Image (cartoon, rainbow, N blue to C red):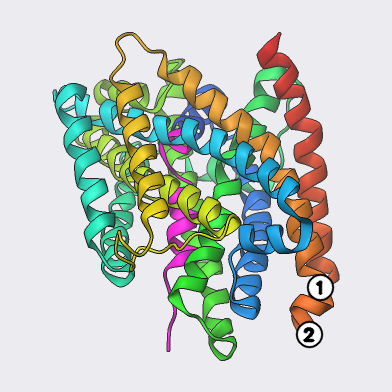
Amino acid sequence: MIILGPGLLSAMAGNDAGGTATYSIAGARYGYSMLWILLLVAVSLIVIQEMCARMGVVTGKGLSDLIREEFGVRWTLFAMAILLIANVAVTISEFAGIAASLEIFHVSRYISVPIVAFFIWWLILKGSYSFVEKIFFGIAFVYVSYVFSGFMAKPEWKDVFLNTVIPHFRFDRDFIHLAIAMIGTTVTPWMQFYLQSSVVEKGTKRKNYRYQKWDIIVGTIVAVFIAFFIIIACGATLHQQGIVINQASDAALALKPIAGNYAAALFAIGLFASSFLGACILPLSSSYAICEAFGFENGISKRISEAPVFFALYTLLILVGACVVLIPNLNLIHVMVFSQTMNGILLPVILVFMLRLVNDKRLMGSYVNSKFNNIVTVVTAVVLIILSGSLFVSVFM
């Protein structure tokens, strides 16, 4: 039995509107200089996602459910409040990506956003878990358009390789902030809640755990591969021309005169697909986490009457995300920056909870963490605490 789904989908959804914007800006501003960071982030993502999947398989419970049982209601309220704030901001950025991608094809956001928002709501409301997962897989395959854009940009592959294997660090504020954003947009707090809840709802058994582990590894490799080519596409074109961009839609428009209409169109299609997938999964992650934390019924496969709070939360998040994007003259890039800042602040907190849980022999038995997993997770948390602190201060200054 091959179990693919939660790991692949959560990792791919990390390349959402905010992720695409981050990678695009990194490529346009610094060329290939930040590619090496993706290799380090890939290791962290595999380790952290695997921890969540293992906890889901062994305990049969979601992450927020375990946090409530082991740490009490106060800490659960704290974690859920911050998660909800961060996820609302990221959900808004997903609809911003949907609007921006379709505006490249001359479709007004006042038409595209309501239609897409309704379709996303209907999809989750009417579909079973297996049906929705198949739809998500189909959307995720559209991400390959980023790869085509990268090849069409005709990069210098020798430079790409050297910058991938040799670290190039710059001690300037923008470089450090982009490095934080790359970590925060690739290894996000909501991923951990969504992944563990999905593993539980999928009903993965311990005997099939090795397949779930491969789902994590494959998902991470594919997601990082896509991010790799987003940076390449912008590094080979926009960086060479000295073109500065502020968000993902700028990258698609700027690619047009340099790499041709098809490269720009493919990039825009990839932006739509990634934003759509993120707009589906982000509200799901919040609904799963909050309902598990406070003992409400949850799950895509349930009816509205069986899980009213779950579907009400999902509907509310979709409405907020879509409606905010329709506000005239809203600076969407500020929303994306805020969401990445919140992700950076929240992730170390969640990692501490996860480490406590996954090393508890009473819960995990022989499935407790290895020393390597603990080291990687602690290093990730410490690095993010230090770097996110500098980002937090600079944003408010």
Q: Main secondary structure of the magenta part?
A: helix
Residue 328 shown left or right of residue 13 in the figure = left
- Label 2: which secondary element: helix
Q: Is residue 258 magenta?
A: no
- Label 1: which secondary element: loop
Q: Amino acid at mark 2?
A: Ser
At 52% from the left and 81% from the top, the residue drawn is 211
Magenta span: 1-20
At 71% from the left and 18% from the top, the residue drawn is 173
In the rendering, at what x and y percent does residue 169 appear?
73, 31
Number of labelled discs? 2
Residue 60 shown left or right of residue 173 in the figure = left
Q: Which disc, if any, is residue 312?
A: none
Q: Which disc, if any, is residue 366?
A: 2
Q: Is residue 2 magenta?
A: yes
In the rendering, at what x and y percent does residue 147 appear?
36, 48
Q: Is residue 357 visible?
A: yes
Quadrant position of residue 155: top left
Q: Is residue 225 visible?
A: no
In the rendering, at what x and y percent does residue 220 appear?
53, 60
At 28% from the left and 68% from the top, the residue drawn is 128
Proximity of marks 2 and 1: CB atoms separated by less than 8 Å: no
Query: Marks 2 and 1, Cα distance to the nearest angstrom?
Result: 10 Å
Quadrant of the drawing holding the C terminus:
top right
The residue tagged 1 is: 370
Up/down of 331 relative to 315, above or below? above
Q: Amino acid at mark 1?
A: Ser
